[in-house]
């Protein structure tokens, strides 16, 4: 295990898609292929049960299977983060204990959803939760899904806790990201800042972010690792070139369909067509693409290979 309280995490930490046979069954064969694909692609860690991993659509049994099998397959080669977001503090703690038992290195937690908390309530919740967790914790800012955003002052307050080691921000708001980074690094210079949206990860790494939790790395890990390396080296010409590829992925693979689920369906469909997973089954309430949408993904992948 990696001690994230002593050595901050950095680099590309893909949020794994969850390969499924149906709503109750993880496709273990596909999960093994996916993890080996990511490790071979040079990624710096693995993030299990994030938004891209459909955590909130999965039963606790399936979540536990994903944790156990991912840790088994990884076998200590990379740091593993496990998302424990839930409406119940008790269930979050249970998942955290499973993660610890299986050998994970850290936890990720977005605010409880359904009941929207005020900032003082949010801080109090984490001040109650964190001491009961067995591993270091990354806060997860996902306002589009949980209705609550961590205020920069709240992150700075929580960053004083030694066990809170970083933030994964999926707000797609670069001003917010910079505001949090400015606030927390006065309190904790080693606090890790990760960007979710791949469209802005490169520029934020240029400005001091520690890395990206980028869904596209499920498909093309080498591309996202190269983007991170170019940004860290301040190699602007290379970064601009790689960013064009990333924007091509974003504007084609993720935009097929007419609903908010298009990103997830497109990513899973592309992973299936690339031979990374066997089946692009999407957990309910969503459903995988029909043939017209699948054909668009096939065309988008063909253009990516040609250019």
Image (tube, helix red, strand yellow):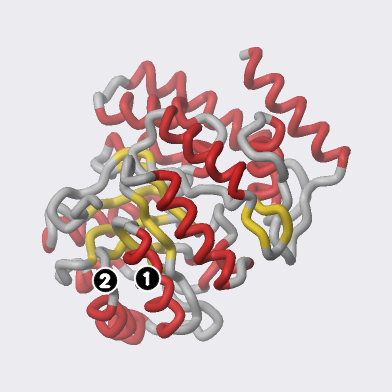
What secondary structure is marked by label 1? helix
The disc at residue 96 is 1
Q: Residue at x 36, y 51 (%)?
A: 80
Q: Position of residue 81 (x, y in %)?
A: 37, 55
Instruction: Categorize mark 1 by other alpha carbons within 10 Å: few (<14), some (14-19), many (20+).
Output: many
Q: Quadrant of residue 266?
A: top right
Please give the residue where the numbered disc 2 appears in the rendered image. Answer: 134
User: Quarter of the image containing the C terminus?
Assistant: top right
- State left or right for residue 22 relative to residue 14: right
Image position of 251 (left or right of 172): right
Q: Quick check: can you spot residue 93?
A: yes
Question: Among all residues in the image, which is located at the extreme top?
Answer: 306
CA separation in Å, label 1 and label 2? 7 Å
In-front residue for pair 205/18 = 18
Q: Which callout, 1 or 2, points at the residue further toward the start of the chain?
A: 1
Q: Position of residue 106 (x, y in %)?
A: 31, 59
Question: Is residue 117 among what the camera can see?
Answer: no
Quarter location, residue 224:
top left
Indicate the position of residue 125 as horizontal and vertical percent values: 33, 83
Q: Is 117 placed above or below 109 here?
A: below
Q: Is residue 143 above or below residue 247?
A: below
Badge 1 vs badge 2, beta-carbon distance below 8 Å: yes
Residue drawn at x 39%, y 23% is 239
What is the quadrant of residue 131 in the picture? Answer: bottom left
In the image, 252 versus 100, the foreground residue is: 100
Q: Is residue 169 left or right of residue 303?
A: left
Q: What x and y, as percent, mark residue 290? A: 85, 45
Task: Tell me the residue at 66%/59% (across/down).
Answer: 25
* As drawn, 240 above or below 276: above
Looking at the rendered structure, which numbered label has been put on residue 12? none
Task: Judge the density around disc 2: few (<14), some (14-19), many (≥20) Cα neighbours within 10 Å.
Answer: some
Q: Secondary structure at mark 2?
A: loop
């Amino acid at each position: 295990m990696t001690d994230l309280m002593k050595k901050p995490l950095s680099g590309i930490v893909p949020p794994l898609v969850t390969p499924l046979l149906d709503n109750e069954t993880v496709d273990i064969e596909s999960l093994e292929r996916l993890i080996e694909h990511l490790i071979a692609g040079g990624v710096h860690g693995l993030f299990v049960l994030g938004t891209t991993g459909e955590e909130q659509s999965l039963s606790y049994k399936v979540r536990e299977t994903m944790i156990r099998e991912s840790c088994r397959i990884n076998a200590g080669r990379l740091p593993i983060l496990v998302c424990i977001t839930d409406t119940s503090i008790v269930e979050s703690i249970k998942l955290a204990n499973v993660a610890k038992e299986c050998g994970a290195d850290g936890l990720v937690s977005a605010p409880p959803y359904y009941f929207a908390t005020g900032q003082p309530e949010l801080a109090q919740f984490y001040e109650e939760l964190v001491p009961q967790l067995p591993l270091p914790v990354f806060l997860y800012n996902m306002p589009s899904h949980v209705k609550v955003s961590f205020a920069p002052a709240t992150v700075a307050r929580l960053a004083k806790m030694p066990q809170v080691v970083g933030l994964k921000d999926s707000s797609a708001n670069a001003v917010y990201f910079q505001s949090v980074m400015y606030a927390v690094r006065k309190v904790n210079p080693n606090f890790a800042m990760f960007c979710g949206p791949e469209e802005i990860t490169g520029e934020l790494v240029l400005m001091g972010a520690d890395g990206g939790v980028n869904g596209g790395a499920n498909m093309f890990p080498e591309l996202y690792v190269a983007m991170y390396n170019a940004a860290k080296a301040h190699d602007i010409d290379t970064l601009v070139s790689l960013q064009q590829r990333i924007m091509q992925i974003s504007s084609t693979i993720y935009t097929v369909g007419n609903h908010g689920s298009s990103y997830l369906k497109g990513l899973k469909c592309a992973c299936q067509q690339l031979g990374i997973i066997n089946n692009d089954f999407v957990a309910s309430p969503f459903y995988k693409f029909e043939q017209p949408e699948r054909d668009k993904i096939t065309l988008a992948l063909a253009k990516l290979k040609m250019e």
